[in-house]
Image (cartoon, grey):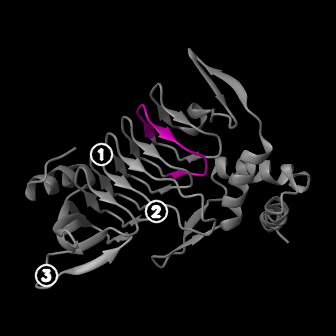
């Protein structure tokens, strides 16, 4: 049995004990070791299978939840800032090749690849942020969210955390995607590689994502196809009190492969008259 398989078995055994409220049987060493592996990026809460699908490592999410159970509140200081929390903060950014602008905060157990830039923002435990990604001012990356390489999360973007239900897929933003200002992505929604979300797009597992580029609308739920250009929209729905507009998202085009990352983001937004953010 590999060391990781052994950890997984110990975490699952501890999870069963914790669910029976037998806290003394939680394997604290296994929990600490698992969160340390998450912090170093040697394991992930979810990982791509190479065929466009993702596998959730449920035992890693169990370890994150157990980590809260075994730790008490502690006071820590970071420069002029004081925190009182159960979880420690991440350290060692210079060695990791990461730029962190004060007062950006990252909890221990989140992994940042080299080249990540964090403006004043927040990254929660279990998250994974790929190389070259920009997390802009007041953007948040929720617990266990998986953010790819060369992604731009513009100002105020909210990436939701998904810890429970324990087998639920976290939010996934694949390589090269661009999320405009104040976008919200929650409930395990997956943003495909190179997709562009205009400012203020809000996506949950139940929000319709409607491709309106063909002769008939094509509806997606919980998934934005690769290179899609998405804008906020509404559609009518009948209620006892009358017909009202409810939120949806509209796929209005495809991002051109002829332009590079930095050029295409602004060009696509201007082309469809949705502005940049």
Mark nearer the viewer, 1 or 3: 1
Q: Quadrant of the C terminus?
A: top left
- Does the magenta run of residues contain 26? no
Q: Count neighbours of disc 2 (C-alpha within 10 A) and say few if under 14, some if 14 to 19, many if 20 or more.
A: many
Q: Residue 92 — which label?
A: none
Residue in view at x 56 percent, y 31 percent: 94
Please, is residue 192 above or below residue 259 in the view? below
Q: Quadrant of the N terminus?
A: bottom right
Q: Earlier in the sequence, mark 2 or mark 1?
A: 1
Q: Position of residue 22 (x, y in %)?
A: 88, 57
- SS at mark 2 in the image: loop
Point out the residue furthest to the bottom here.
Answer: 216
- SS at mark 3 in the image: loop
**Distance between mark 3 and mark 2 Cα atoms:** 28 Å
Q: Earlier in the sequence, mark 3 or mark 2?
A: 2
Q: Which region is colored magenta?
A: 117-129
Please, is residue 233 above or below residue 38 in the view? below
Please, is residue 28 above or below residue 257 in the view? above
Q: Which residue is mark 3?
A: 214
Q: Which residue is mark 1?
A: 182
- Answer whether residue 258 is visible to the viewer in this image: no
- SS at mark 1 in the image: loop
> Who is closer to the viewer here, 225 or 142?
142
Q: Earlier in the sequence, mark 1 or mark 3?
A: 1
Point out the residue furthest to the front here.
Answer: 241
């Amino acid at each position: 049995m590999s060391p990781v398989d052994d950890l997984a078995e110990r975490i699952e055994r501890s999870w069963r004990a914790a669910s029976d409220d037998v806290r003394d049987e939680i394997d604290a060493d296994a929990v600490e070791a698992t969160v340390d592996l998450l912090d170093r990026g040697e394991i992930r809460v979810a990982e791509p299978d190479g065929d466009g699908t993702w596998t959730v490592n449920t035992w890693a999410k169990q370890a994150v939840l157990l980590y809260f159970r075994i730790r008490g509140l502690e006071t820590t200081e970071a420069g002029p800032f004081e925190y009182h929390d159960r979880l420690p903060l991440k350290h060692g950014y210079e060695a990791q090749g990461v730029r962190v602008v004060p007062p950006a905060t990252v909890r221990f157990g989140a992994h940042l690849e080299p080249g990540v830039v964090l403006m004043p923002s927040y990254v929660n435990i279990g998250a994974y942020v790929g190389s070259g990604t920009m997390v802009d001012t007041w953007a948040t990356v929720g617990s266990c969210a998986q953010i790819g390489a060369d992604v731009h999360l513009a100002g105020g973007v909210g990436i939701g955390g998904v810890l429970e239900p324990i087998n639920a897929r976290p939010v996934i933003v694949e390589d090269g995607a661009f999320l405009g200002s104040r976008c919200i992505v929650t409930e395990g929604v997956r943003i495909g590689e190179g997709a562009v979300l205009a400012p203020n797009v809000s996506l949950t597992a139940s929000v319709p994502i409607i491709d309106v580029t063909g002769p008939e609308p094509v509806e997606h739920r919980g998934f934005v196809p690769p290179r899609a250009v998405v804008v906020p929209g509404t559609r009518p729905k009948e209620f006892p009190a009358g017909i009202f507009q409810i939120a949806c998202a509209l796929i209005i085009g495809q991002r051109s492969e002829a332009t590079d990352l930095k050029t295409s983001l602004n060009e696509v937004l201007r082309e469809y008259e949705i502005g940049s953010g």
